[in-house]
Amino acid sequence: MTTPQTTPGDIREPRLARDGVNRIEWAAREMPVIGLIRERFRREQPLRGVRIGACLHVTTETANLMLALKDGGADVALCASNPLSTQDDVAAALVHEYGIATWAIKGEDNDTYWKHINAVLDTRPQLTMDDGCDLVALLHKERRDLLPVIKGGTEETTTGVIRLRGMMKDGALTYPIVAVNEADTKHMFDNRYGTGQSTLDGITRATNVLWAAKTVVVAGYGWCGRGFASRARGLGAQVIVTEVEPVRALEAVMDGFRVLPMASAATQGDIFVTLTGDVNVIDRQHLEAMKDGAIIANSGHFNDEINIKALEAMAEGKREIRPFVEEYKLGDGRKIHLLGEGRLINLAAAEGHPASVMDMSFANQALSVEYLVMNEGKIAVGVYDVPKEIDREIAALKLSSMGVAIDVLTPEQEAYLSSWESGT
Ligand code: ADE
């Protein structure tokens, strides 16, 4: 017998809720910082009565963030920030075990995806929490009647921050948003070690390939590309990096990677991974140059980094040869394998970043939301960095949870650092 649904939402299967609870509790073990924030929120109720509309990947880690916000007194409504990233057991647990309104089904079509974002907006949130800016963009394009209620928001990811800055430049943004991605305790860890590991995990689970001796082409050498390139090398792959930004390309060269234009890399790679945040980074001419059997995947936010339309047009046929692996047969007999429909492979075929890094990303989310509530009405429209004190507090809490102690400046050192008198 299934439990009747009293919390609003749209999920795949209520019977998955128990599995969801177990996995959410398992993730909590690796999220001590969120755990501490949750305890304090429970005592202090800093978010009492605040309605939060969140559009995030619905994972065990996100569930722990939602629970912290709820325990802080917030009314939370959640939907997926990608059609393929939802963990259905987590969505079931949120609705049926924790009473958190959740609209998210793994594999939902685009119409359902937008219907779910609209359902969250229907709860008339006062704060938005977005991952990729789809919720905020929809709000500004089609649900403008809700804007007067909104006091602020947060954004999780690089792509979302880029879109927000575009909105700001066009004068389209109407409320202040904290760019969580810009915190050091977010991008230096989540983007680098999280994406690095979870992308390898997603591709490995989807394909079971041996990385050793493969030629792996990494498109983009931002924090995510750096992390993935170093992990692929760690497993014995020969890594080629492609870049458009000279300083990053130089860094990749000095980190010991080969750097090539995609047109040259295309002929050499066995596995291609895009982590750029840009469009058609693997384009038709690159697909035309690839070796038979090439594997292509994306770990950037949107599924437009690979020109899938061109691949479809070039193909005579396709079949799903394994879950998350689509084999395209081209006119000249070559086969190209596209993973996870070109969507974030780490969340489509694996579980996203491990809890230990999401602990810091989501601590930034929780504390930024508290900061917005505490400073309501005092922050002008704009895109803001996470306050440095929050960033440092999270790093200190994480270190202490790991049992790592560090030095403190002596008074003499403090004075030295703030003086210009001493020199040679
Ligand atoms: N983004 C990447 N990994 C994630 C995770 N595990 N949970 C939520 N968002 C993510």
Image (cartoon, helix red, strand yellow):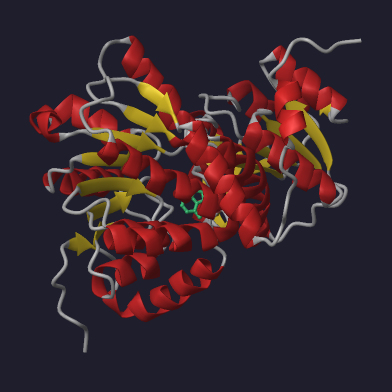
In the rendered image, the vertical position of residue 55 relative to residue 286, given as above or below: below
Q: Nearer the viewer, residue 315 or 137?
A: 137
Q: Residue furthest right?
A: 424
Q: Name the quadrant of the N terminus.
A: bottom left
In the rendered image, the vertical position of residue 77 relative to residue 145, given as above or below: below
Q: Residue at x 64, y 29 (%)?
A: 222
Q: Nearer the viewer, residue 305 or 401?
A: 401
In the rendered image, the vertical position of residue 422 relative to residue 64, given as above or below: above
Q: Quadrant of residue 75?
A: bottom left
Left or right relative to 283: residue 37: left
Q: Position of residue 89 (x, y in %)?
A: 38, 70
Q: Position of residue 337 (x, y in %)?
A: 62, 46
Q: Residue furthest left?
A: 145
Q: Residue at x 59, y 25 (%)?
A: 281
Q: Name the quadrant of the C terminus.
A: top right
Q: Residue at x 40, y 25 (%)?
A: 384
Residue 298 visible here: no
Q: Residue at x 27, y 20 (%)?
A: 381
Q: Position of residue 153 (x, y in %)?
A: 30, 35
Residue 281 visible here: yes
Q: Nearer the viewer, residue 381 or 235?
A: 381
Left or right relative to 312: residue 140: left
